[in-house]
Amino acid sequence: MTTVFDPIDLAGTQLSNRIALAPMTRSRAGEGGTATDLAVEYYTQRASAGLIITEGIQPSVVGQGYPSTPGLHSAEQVTSWRKVTDAVHAAGGRIFAQIMHAGRIGHPVLLPDGLTPVAPSPVAAPGQVYTHVGPKGFVEPHELTDAEIRETVRDFATASRNAIEAGFDGVELHGANGYLIQQFLAPNTNLRTDGWGGSDEARIRFAVEVVKAVVAEIGSARTALRISPGNPYNGIQEPEPDAVYTALVAELEPLGLAYLHILEQAGTRDLTLALRKRFTGTLVINVFSEGPTGPEHHTVIDDGIADIIAYGALFLANPDLPARLKAGGPYNTPDPSTFFGGDAKGYTDYPALDTV
C-alpha cells in the first residue's frame, strides 16, 4: 500500500515523500515585490516536504491583490527568488512557484499609476481588503477587453518563464479561492456573452488558454493548476460546479500536466473522485472540507484518493511536519494572529521535533 511517506516521480521531478507545503499568502515581500531573507529561511525550514508550493506570486503589476506580496515580473524579483530556490535545493527540497493574479480582489491604493483591479466582468467583490492605509472596500473592477485578456494570458506565460529562470522546479497556476482564473470560471463573476463567457465551455476558456500558454513556454512537466470547485471564498458562487470543472479537466487531461491540485470543499468529495477518474496525472489534495488539513487526513493517500496531500496551517506551525507525521506528533498549535505581516514569530521560530 502506498503511504504519504513514499517517494513519487512528479513528471520527472523526484519527490522524497507525498507531503506538500500548501501555498499561503504571507505578505512579507520586500521593496518592489522581492523575496526576502525571511522567505529564504521560511521555505528552507520546510524543505523536508516532498514538494513546496510557494505563496501566490503576481505575474504583473495589476495582478497584486494584497500588500507586500511578491512578483515574478521584474529582473529584481527573479534575482531575489533565486536565493530561495538555491537554498531549498541545497537542503534537498523541491519547489514550485504559485502564479496568482488576484483579479478583482485588491484595491487601487495597492497599485501604482492609477491602476484599477481587473476582472472578466465589472462585478465588485463583497467585503474589504486590508491595505497599508487600513481596510478598504472592494471596488468595481475594470472589465478586461479581449485584447487585455490575451495580454493577461501572456503575463502568466512570461511569469512562468521567469520562475524557471529563478530556479523553480515548476509553477502552479492559481485557479482557486476566487482569484482571476476562478472569476472566469464562476457564473456570478463572469457575466460575459462573448467567447470568454456565457456557457460552461466559454467560461473555462481563460483557464485553458492560460495553462496552454504556460505549457508552451516551460513544458507540461513543469506546469500545474490549482482549483477549488464550489469554494465561496472572495464572493464566488458556484452552486453547481460539477459541469464546468469536469469540462475543464477534460480539456487539460491531454496536456500531461505535472499535477492537478484540488482545494476540496465540504460536500465535494464525489466531484473530487470524479475528477480523479478523468485526470490520469498526479493529483494533489488539500482537504479543506472539514477545516484546515490535519494530521489525520493523510489517509487520503492510503485510500488512493490522491497522490500528494498539501498541508497549510499545520505546516506553518510545524516546519518539520513530515517528521512529526511519521512520529505521530507532537504538533505545535498554529497561531493565526502571526500568519501575516513582518513579525516572523509563528513562522520560523518553532522548535524542531528533536528538541521538544
Image (cartoon, rainbow, N blue to C red):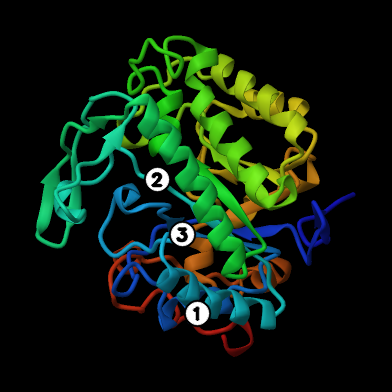
The amino acid marked with disc number 3 is: Glu
The residue identified by callout 1 is 40
Does residue 276 appear to the left or right of 296 in the view shown?
right
Sequence-first disc among 1 and 3: 1
Does residue 333 appear to the left or right of 299 in the view shown?
left
Spatial separation of the CA atoms under disc 1 and disc 2: 23 Å
Give residue 101's mark: 2
Asked if labels 2 and 1 touch by Cβ distance under 8 angstroms, the answer is no
Q: Residues within 10 Å of mark 2 (few under 14, many from 20)?
A: many
Closer to viewer: mark 2 or mark 3: 2
Spatial separation of the CA atoms under disc 2 and disc 3: 12 Å
**Quadrant in which residue 191 is drawn:** top left
Counting labels gives: 3
Task: Give the residue at x 64% y 29%.
Answer: 272
Check disc 3 and report its element: helix, strand or loop.
strand
Counting from the top left corner in percent of width and height, residue 188 is at: 33, 19
Whether residue 218 is visible: yes
**Quadrant in which residue 339 is drawn:** bottom left
Give residue 124's mark: none
Q: Residues within 10 Å of mark 1 (few under 14, many from 20)?
A: some
Does residue 257 appear to the left or right of 133 in the view shown?
right
The residue identified by callout 3 is 55
Counting from the top left corner in percent of width and height, residue 246 is at: 63, 20
Check disc 1 and report its element: helix, strand or loop.
helix
The amino acid marked with disc number 2 is: His
Task: Give the residue at x 61% y 62%.
Answer: 164
Check disc 2 and report its element: helix, strand or loop.
loop
Does residue 314 appear to the left or right of 275 in the view shown?
left
Task: Give the residue at x 32% y 74%.
Answer: 30
